[in-house]
Amino acid sequence: MKIVIDSNRVIAALLKDSTTREILFNSKFEFIAPEFLKAEIEKYEAFLIKKTKIRADEFDVLLSIIFERIRLISLKEYEKYIKKLKSEISDPKDIPFLACNLATKAEGIWTHDAHFLKQDKIKAYTNIDLLNLTGSK
């Protein structure tokens, strides 16, 4: 099942070994994201290292392992959807995730962002939803 992964789920997976990390490594899912996601996460690297209390080299390894599970989609692949979606969601930073979803024909987005719950273009999945799909809950 192809799912767009939101930044908040990647950050959650980095912060602690949790349900989010378990879902991320479940082979039932193929995770994709706009290519800028990696740069966005790296922008908060110092904060995340401090929060997780792990060394920078350990953080880099964890980040690499997590991004092995996420196929990054180039802007070129989804840019034609961006203008069409400007009025569909209240947070403009979320538009590339919607566009990425539509361009790749993913099943939806894995997020805990309330903005995605207020739009009707794509299905928004939470941890509970994905656990239910795997039969874990």
Image (spheres, rainbow, N blue to C red):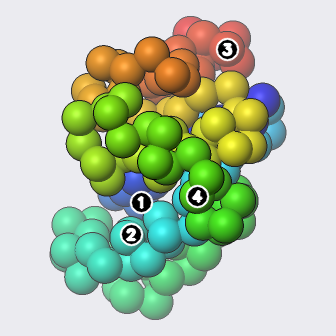
Within 10 Å of disc 1 (Cα), the crowding (few <14, some 14-19, many 20+) is many
Q: Amino acid at mark 1?
A: Leu
Q: Which residue is mark 4?
A: 79
Q: Of marks 1 and 3, which one's residue comes earlier in the chain?
A: 1
Residue 86 percent across, percent down from the top left: 36, 41
Label 1 sits on a secondary structure element that is helix
Disc number for residue 133: 3
The CA distance from mark 1 to mark 3 is 23 Å
Image: 34 above or below 134: below
Determine which of the numbered discs, if any, sits on residue 41 in the image: 2
Q: Are marks 4 and 2 in contact (CB under 8 Å)?
A: no
Is residue 89 shown to the viewer in this render? yes
Of the 4 image quadrants, the one containing the N terminus is top right
Q: From the viewer's side, name the closer residue of 10 and 109.
A: 109
Question: Of the residues shown, which amino acid type is indicated by label 4?
Answer: Glu
Task: Name the front one of labels 3 and 2.
Answer: 2
Residue 70 horizontal side relative to residue 83, left or right = right
Badge 1 vs badge 3, beta-carbon distance below 8 Å:
no
Circle 1 is placed at which residue position?
14
Left or right: 99 in relation to 126: right
SS at circle 4: helix
Q: Nearer the viewer, mark 2 or mark 1?
A: 2
Q: CA distance from mark 2 to mark 1?
A: 10 Å
Query: In which quarter of the view is residue 72 placed?
Result: bottom right
Residue that appears at 51% across and 22% down:
121
Q: Secondary structure at mark 2?
A: helix
Q: Is residue 30 left or right of residue 110?
A: right
| Label 4 – label 1 distance at C-alpha | 28 Å
Instruction: Tell which circle, 4 or 2, labels the residue nearer the N-terminal end.
Output: 2
**Do the CB atoms of the residues marked 2 and 1 lie less than 8 Å apart?**
yes
Cα–Cα span, label 4 and label 2: 21 Å
